[in-house]
Amino acid sequence: MRAIYFDGTKASFETDRAIPEAGIDESLIKVDLAALCNTDREVMRGYSPGFAGVMGHEFVGTVMRSSDTELEGKRVVGEINLSCFSDDCLYCATGRDHHCESRTTLGIVDKDGCFADYITLPTRLVHTIPDDMVDEVALFTEPLAAAIRIIEQTPLVVDLPVALVGDGRLAYMIAQVVALTHASLTVYGKDRDKLEMFAPFARTILVDQIDWDGEHDTYEVVIDATGNPESLASSIALTRSEGFLIMKSTYADKAQIDMSEVVVRELTIRGSRCGPFAPALDLLERGLITLPPVEIFLPQDFEKAFASQAFKVALDF
């Protein structure tokens, strides 16, 4: 089969990889569309040391064979964290299976991903797509679920001052999820054109217009979704004392912060990763999320896809 394989240093397009075999309680899925994420770019920069394998973790596909035969022939999306689900596992036994210490992660940690003609996943992680939902909409399930995870962890209330730092693809999903809570949202970004897309959901501010040494607005909750370690200091500066800073960024580089400021101002820094698929599919089915167009490439043109600046990029398998 065809696949985009990362050898630990560089990615390459291959045509002779073996089709994976589904094990017990697994499904074999033919990939139809596979979306690029900034995390995929960070993997190539060393975000997941030691990873070598097929890249990619956002996809829409069709089930070919499954431990649940009713799924066969269905269009699906899939969660990306493969946990042990053992009663002997502290995290799996306490409902925190997405932090299982022996988990693998699709296209990121010890599990071949979806930049390929076929993938396998535990059947429990597979979610069917409504018949009237097109692939280009279903493709947003994984990043939208990650956005929903924020309000699972930190419930937001009406008129709560919230800042979102970042104007990229994930930030666009986050802004809309936060807007549904009726919090008072402000989005900070570097690109004027991108910020215009956020205007229906939030107040927008260009970061280069802020006097960081002078007076500026602060917020009870700040969400960093820039994917850039250099933004962390700005995100801390926007967070009110005793406020919450939610880190949604993943990157290969290390970030440096003044921990004394965190202690003295009693800030809470919270990491936020993957989220629930069912409510994400529900929001998409109800048409409550505005989606940008998807720019689609053939898999052999993956280098052009990775270089694209389009808001959402996908490979057509």
Image (cartoon, grey):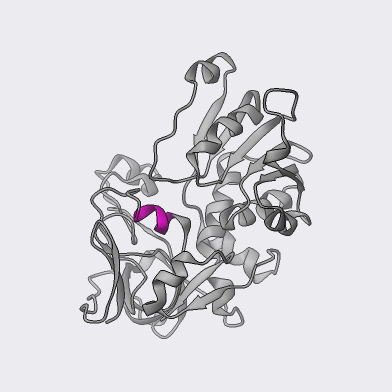
Residue 229 part of the magenta segment: no
User: Residue at (65%, 43%) from the top-left corner?
Assistant: 164
Residue in the picture at 23% in, 50% down: 50
Spot occupied by residue 183 in the image (x, y as percentages of width and height): 74, 43
Task: Measuring from the top left, give residue 317's x and y in whole percent.
Answer: 41, 81
Q: Is residue 259 left or right of residue 215?
A: left
In the depicted structure, whether residue 51 falls above or below residue 64: above
Instruction: Give me the residue at 69% from left, 69% from top.
Output: 286
What quarter of the picture does the N terminus occupy? Answer: bottom left
Does residue 121 sit above or below 45 in this rendering?
below
Is residue 40 in the magenta section?
yes
Q: Quadrant of residue 69?
A: bottom left
Q: Is residue 124 above or below residue 102?
A: below
The answer to which quarter of the image holds residue 74 is bottom left
Identify the residue at horizontal 52%, vertical 44% (top origin): 248
Q: Position of residue 217 (x, y in %)?
A: 75, 30
